[in-house]
Amino acid sequence: MKVLKFGGTSVGSAENINKVINILDQQSKNTNIAVVVSAVGGITDKLLEAANLACDKNEDYKQKYDVIWSIHNKVIEGLFENSENDSELQKHQDNLRELISEKLNELKSLLNGIYLINELSPQTKDKLLSFGEALSSTIIYHTLKARQIDAALKNSQEVIVTDSNFNNAIVNFEITNTNIQEFFSSNSNAIVLFPGFVSKSAHGEITTLGRGGSDYTAAIIAAAMDADELQIWTDVSGMYTTNPKLVKQASPIVELSYQEAVELSHFGAKVLYPPTVMPVLKKQIPIVIKNTMDPE
Ligand code: ADP
Ligand code: ASP
Ligand code: MG
């Protein structure tokens, strides 16, 4: 098995999600794959901004919500742009739009609640942040189904169990590993999709794994399943000597040790969320960092 994680930019537009689907289609021909997806690019920040405005009794939170709504609807529109003369595709699109509307209405109620009570606790924040990955994974899963690609969607909250340290929860690996192994022992889909970043406490509360935590979700699944490889698909072609978006002279590092990867990520190489390395290091699973926009 291989585990593939796609970050915010990779799932940030219909065009990029189509690239992701091509990669999944290719790779699932050779082996079973678990796929972890982030929220649509920028959505986690927008969710937080909306919640902070609501908490401050600033009605502008409604505009932020509208932006979140329109970004997701634009993605769906792009993914189903050729569905006009295809009644099957149209059915899939209608079904997806209904599911996304339900989730967005739930989000709206939560934001209204924050506005009314003037309060945003760490626990509520995690509930709110979980919407980003719930929306993106639902969109991608139903697009795969519409294109008749064999896939399942599994909510990571049903397998990744943590303590109640909201916003930065600590994983209980004993329970989590068993849950993941049990799930896969009775699953036969070529592709299983998981929302990144989200988890649940032993008491059933929604928790999250820290900003950038989808990388960690993928590493947790890879380690539990003794995967052959953990692929981190992002918007740059590997780990560089420094941030390639800021420094023209940055060059990609062909190969580095787990230790060096941890060090670089600790000192700000955001391309890899620091806790990601530990679970895969223990199993000596290689991490391969790939660019969704330049897969070769
Ligand atoms: P994703 O949304 O795919 O998780 P991130 O934004 O979290 O992507 O991480 C990728 C970004 O990390 C790159 O766009 C780049 O700007 C930044 N980055 C910072 N330092 C480095 C580095 N040394 N090597 C590669 N990328 C880096
Ligand atoms: N969506 C979350 C964040 O922006 C997790 C992730 O993308 O890795 O922090
Ligand atoms: Mg990231």
Image: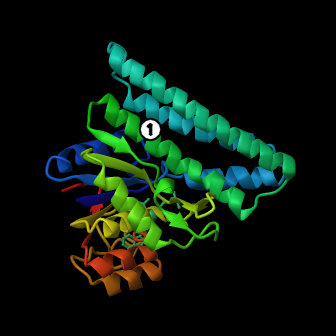
Q: Which residue is found at the position 72% from the left and 45% from the top?
A: 110
Q: Amino acid at mark 1?
A: Ile
Residue at 49% from the left image edge and 51% from the top image edge: 39
Foreground residue among 49 and 114: 114
Quarter of the displayed picture in which ligand 3 can be seen: bottom left
Q: Quadrant of residue 184?
A: bottom left
Which residue is at a point 33% across and 29% down the rendered structure image? 146
Q: Quadrant of residue 177?
A: bottom left
- Vertical position of residue 247 compared to residue 119: above or below: below
Q: Is residue 163 left or right of residue 268?
A: right
Percent across and percent down for residue 244 are 37, 69
Residue at image position (24%, 73%) is 286
Can residue 120 be seen in this snapshot? yes
Above-or-below relation of 105 to 277: above
Query: Callout 1 environment at 10 Å: few (<14), some (14 to 19), or many (20+)?
Result: many
Element at label 1: helix
Rendered location of residue 17, percent (x, y)? 36, 43
From the viewer's side, name the closer residue of 217 and 264. 217
> Horizontal and vertical percent for residue 50?
70, 49
| Viewport quadrant of the N terminus | bottom left
Q: Which residue is mark 1?
A: 139
Count the labels in the image. 1
Residue 292, can we see it?
no
Q: Is residue 32 left or right of residue 91?
A: left
In the rendered image, residue 161, in percent from the top left (x then y), is placed at 52, 64
